[in-house]
Amino acid sequence: MSDVVHTGGCQCGAIRFRLVGDAPDASICHCRMCQKAFGAYYAPLVAAGEAELTWTRGQLKYFHSSNHVRRGFCENCGTPMTYEAEDGIAISAGSFDEPGRLPPVVQFGAEGKIGFVDRLHELPERDTMDDIASAPFLDDIVSYQHPDHDTETWPPENNPKEDEQ
Ligand SMILES: [Zn+2]
Ligand SMILES: [Zn+2]
């Protein structure tokens, strides 16, 4: 087994995890269950497979979406975290600190695929700060999102700006 390490967590930082070992297969699932669970057009998931998964902070809450599947989420901020069934556990890809390291290799639940998903790459693109004129509050925005790395304490006690990137 390799010692490749992936870390991640929910948006607020109450839940953190570490995944060590051969990774993991990333996928997206178009099924209607996953659309609802993620509030999204499809769900990006990373199957932990044989890698060793440790929850390093916090405890998930679960919704049993069927008799065979439960889905874990952060009860504090609502981030979808897991899909868990008899054949293993998968973690939401966007919750990884570096999701770009885990490109998806397959699509599941194709029967539920929303047609326009195949055309998303054709849409015009804008950066966040392109909208500063119509959303001037962006100018002094302060993020309360947990940073993309493990922290000793969260939220930071003294200087909240230190970790906000
Ligand atoms: Zn959270
Ligand atoms: Zn699904």
Image (cartoon, rainbow, N blue to C red):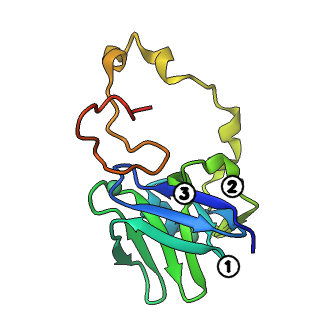
Quadrant of the rendering where the N terminus is positioned: bottom right
Type of amino acid at the residue the image marks with label 1:
Glu
Residue assigned mark 1: 50
Residue 13 appears left or right of 104: left
Q: Is residue 112 visible?
A: no
Residue at 61% x, 86% y is 87
Pointer 2 residue Cβ closer than 8 Å to ligand 2: no
Residue assigned mark 3: 7
Residue at 60% x, 58% y is 6
Type of amino acid at the residue the image marks with label 3:
Thr
46 lies above or below 9: below
Looking at the picture, tell me which residue is in the foreground, 48 or 126.
48
Distance between the Cα atoms at labels 1 and 3?
16 Å
> Mark 2 or mark 1, which is nearer the start of the sequence?
1
Looking at the picture, tell me which residue is in the foreground, 28 or 76.
76
Residue assigned mark 2: 102
Residue at 65% x, 52% y is 115
The picture places residue 80, in percent across and down from the top left corner, at 42, 61
| Mark 1 neighbour density, 10 Å: few (under 14) some (14–19) many (20 or more) | some
> Mark 3 or mark 2, which is nearer the start of the sequence?
3
The picture places residue 28, in percent across and down from the top left corner, at 64, 61
Q: Nearer the viewer, mark 2 or mark 3?
A: 3
Residue at 32% x, 17% y is 140
